[in-house]
Amino acid sequence: MSKIVGFGSESFSVAIYIANRPGFAQYPELAKLKPLEPGEIEYIVTNTSNHWRKVFNVYAKFLSLLRSRKNSAVQDWRNYRDNHLLQSHSTEALLFSAPEFDRPGVVHIVAGKTHAAAMGLESVVWLDNSFAVDVKKALIICPYLDYRQLSDNRIERLIELVLKLE
């Protein structure tokens, strides 16, 4: 059985899988699921490239909109990013390992076609050029977590797909 590696809570119900990780401090050697501490996202962004700011911002936008659709509690995505995203009390993970589909109640989202292909995820049905699903595995392939690739319109589409799988 593979090991879950990345950032987030042990009780995640949404997992996004990306191909890379922050390349400094303890992160390249991280070999477990690690909840981020308050302020750690800011630390990562300050010590890496603009890429990580985009990843965290897009993930926070997606989750804050998803949560507002589910329970009508609108929360600013910046507040969500700074106070909840990938922390121990959250319900999400950003994973560097391969999906483990035997975890019940988890929606798996692979960011990027290239990453999905590298993991051998071939059972998906492509809905269009941006999104693919495997309903049995609660798996979605979406564009990478970048403003241009996963635009606001595509975030809305991703939310619709997640709500159908939950």
Image (cartoon, rainbow, N blue to C red):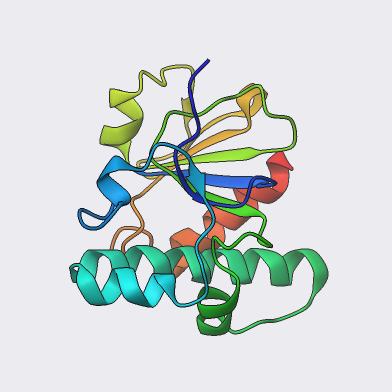
Percent from the top left, x then y, of residue 100? Answer: 56, 25
154 over 49 or under it: above or below: above
**In this picture, is 39 found above or below 69?**
below
User: Which quadrant of the view contains residue 28?
Assistant: top left
Q: Is residue 55 above or below residue 21?
A: below
Res. 147 visible in picture: no
- Above or below residue 85? Residue 124 is above
> What percent of the width, then of the height, locates residue 69?
73, 67
Residue 154, percent from left and from top: 45, 59
Q: In the picture, which quadrant includes the C terminus?
A: top right
Tell whether 127 sits left or right of 101: left
Closer to the camera in the image, 11 or 144: 11
Q: Is residue 162 visible?
A: yes
Quick one: 50 or 36, which is closer to the camera? 36
Count of number-bearing discs: 0
Residue 8 screen position, x and y as percent: 55, 53
Q: Residue at x 69, y 62 (%)?
A: 89
- Is residue 44 left or right of 159 when viewed as pictured? left
Relative to the observer, which residue lies in front, 90 or 161? 90
Residue at 47 percent of width and 39 percent of height? 32
Which residue appears at 55% of the width and 62% of the height? 156
Is residue 99 shown left or right of residue 51? right
